[in-house]
Amino acid sequence: MDEELRVLTERSRAEADASGARAVCDRLARDAGPDELAAVLTEPGHPLWARELAAFRLGSAGDRRAFESLVLLLNHRDPPRCAAAAEALARLGDPRTARAAAALATNELRVAYALQPVRLLTALRAPESVPALITTLERRLRPHDPYRRVALACVEGLGALGDARAAPVLREALAHPALAEAATGALARLAGRG
């Protein structure tokens, strides 16, 4: 069992224990096959922890039946669920992932939950990544924006991606004390690749 699945299983067990479903949780974490896991995603009545565990296992195995569930979890209000979904989506290899992550990262109504989509876009290195990170960062540079962690993830991601199109917005980020150090590093990486 890899570390991400172990952490998810422990979290799921805590939720399952509250309803007396520990055995179900253990089966989903270790023994359930792909079809059984997919059924958890489509049949009514399964709790969120079970759906998350099934989606993570399917996604990590490259089974695209998990895609829709993982995208929903990527946009969940609970940060550990978002992080687990991002990890599984990165492993999934579905060509729709970058487009979905870009849509979530740039959705101003859900910006409070954009941190993991931004990190996922960086990991994917897809054609959608740089434009989405630029758009998200531009919006975070407004005065008194409360989403500095999202902005910082954008700056770091743009530096890691090394695309020259990011230079103007990274220069703008220099004026923001919380972002200046990361923006300086990102610009230096861009200059080093030029």
Image (cartoon, rainbow, N blue to C red):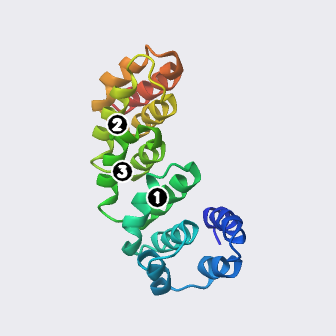
Instruction: Look at the numbered disc 1 and give the secondary structure of its residue.
Output: helix
Label 1 vs label 2: CA separation? 18 Å
Mark 1 or 2, nearer chain start: 1
Indicate whether 181 appears above or below 75.
above
Q: Where is residue 110 drawn, in percent x and y?
A: 39, 42
Amino acid type at image mark 3: Ala
Mark 3 or 2, nearer chain start: 3
Q: Residue at x 53, y 53 (%)?
A: 83
The residue indicated by pointer 3 is 101
Indicate whether 81 appears above or below 29.
above
Q: Where is residue 16 drawn, in percent x and y?
A: 67, 71
Amino acid type at image mark 1: Leu
Name the one closer to the observer, 156 or 15: 15
Mark in the foreground, 1 or 3: 1
Name the one closer to the observer, 15 or 55: 15
For residue 37, side relative to residue 14 (left or right): left
Amino acid type at image mark 2: Glu
Q: Which residue is at the far top?
A: 175
The residue indicated by pointer 1 is 73
Category of crowding for the residue at label 1, using alpha-carbon neighbours closer than 10 angstroms: few (below 14), some (14–19), many (at least 20) = many
Question: For the N terminus, which image quadrant?
Answer: bottom right
Q: Quadrant of residue 142?
A: top left
